[in-house]
Amino acid sequence: MDMLLSVFRSRFLIAALTRRDLQSRYIGTLGGSLWTFVHPLLLIGVFYVVFSFGFKAKGPGGSPFALWFVCGMVPWLFFSEALQAATGSITRSASLIKKTTLPPEILPIVPIVSGLVNHGIFLVIFLGMLVWFRVDLGLARLSLVWFLFSLCSLLIGLSWLLAALQVFYRDISHVVTAVLNLWFWATPIVWSSDMIASQYRGLLLLNPMYYVVEGYRGSLIDSQIRWPESTQAITFWCVVFIVLAVGMTVFKRLKPEFVDAL
């Protein structure tokens, strides 16, 4: 609990570092924050054109493919970008670690918080799509908050683990990029879980992003709010608690060696 308490006590410092992180991304650029959305929107556009017009794909149950696909991409973009940024958060802040008494456990949290800002803007854009497709927006849609909390819990554990290992093994960031590419295709974002044979569908439960993506879709695009099955939720939280425990343990044990390694 000491790491979680340290993060809570440093919440104002995290807010200041997040503000600095967001500002530093756009220094010297003409487009400013616009560049944050150009790449993801182009990526979404390419996938949408290929699968919607090339393969003439449709969402499950005849739902608009654009809604179904973008709803899966929104949490994935937040997850992948925040995790890659958090992995290198300690090595990028070597001067802060060496010259200040800054608690290093807050550094992997900063990319997650700054990612939440961009994620919120994407959600607003997606809400515009829901209005365009005349999807009912009731208060029940706020169940999305639970799945956003679930995603952040997974991110925190992975970020602490990978950020600590990155200090000693600089190849970790490259491994993360490669794994995320495979992880994307292992998650039903551009394909439906119904395409998998029933006897193998249970393997999807071991993919925590499956729970998050399906939770987003069940909260936002279904006519009635649809929660994942209890088995899926239990498996997800078992994975998250293991990741958090391992991430905290590894980070706490390696933290005293950060200054020497950096």
Image: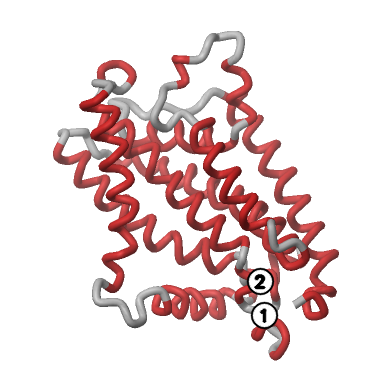
Q: Which residue is mark 1?
A: 94
Answer left or right for 16 relative to 95: left
Count the marks: how many?
A: 2
Residue occupying the point 45% across, 15% down: 195
Name the image quarter holding residue 103.
bottom right
Give the residue type that dot 2 points to.
Ile
Which element is circle 1 on?
helix
Q: Is residue 140 visible?
A: no
Q: Which disc number belongs to residue 90?
A: 2
User: As displayed, is residue 98 above or below residue 56?
Assistant: below
Please tell me which residue lies in front, 221 or 141. Answer: 221
Real-space Cα separation, disc 1 to disc 2, in angstroms: 6 Å
Answer left or right for 260 relative to 11: right
Q: Are marks 1 and 2 in contact (CB under 8 Å)?
A: yes
| Position of residue 66 measured from the top left corner of the image (x, y, whole percent) | 25, 33
Residue occupying the point 28% across, 57% down: 38
Answer left or right for 4 relative to 214: right
Give the residue type that dot 1 points to.
Ala
Name the image quarter holding residue 102.
bottom right
Residue occupying the point 80% across, 75% down: 261
Q: Is residue 172 visible?
A: yes
Q: Residues within 10 Å of mark 1 (few under 14, many from 20)?
A: some
| Position of residue 186 measured from the top left corner of the image (x, y, whole percent) | 53, 30
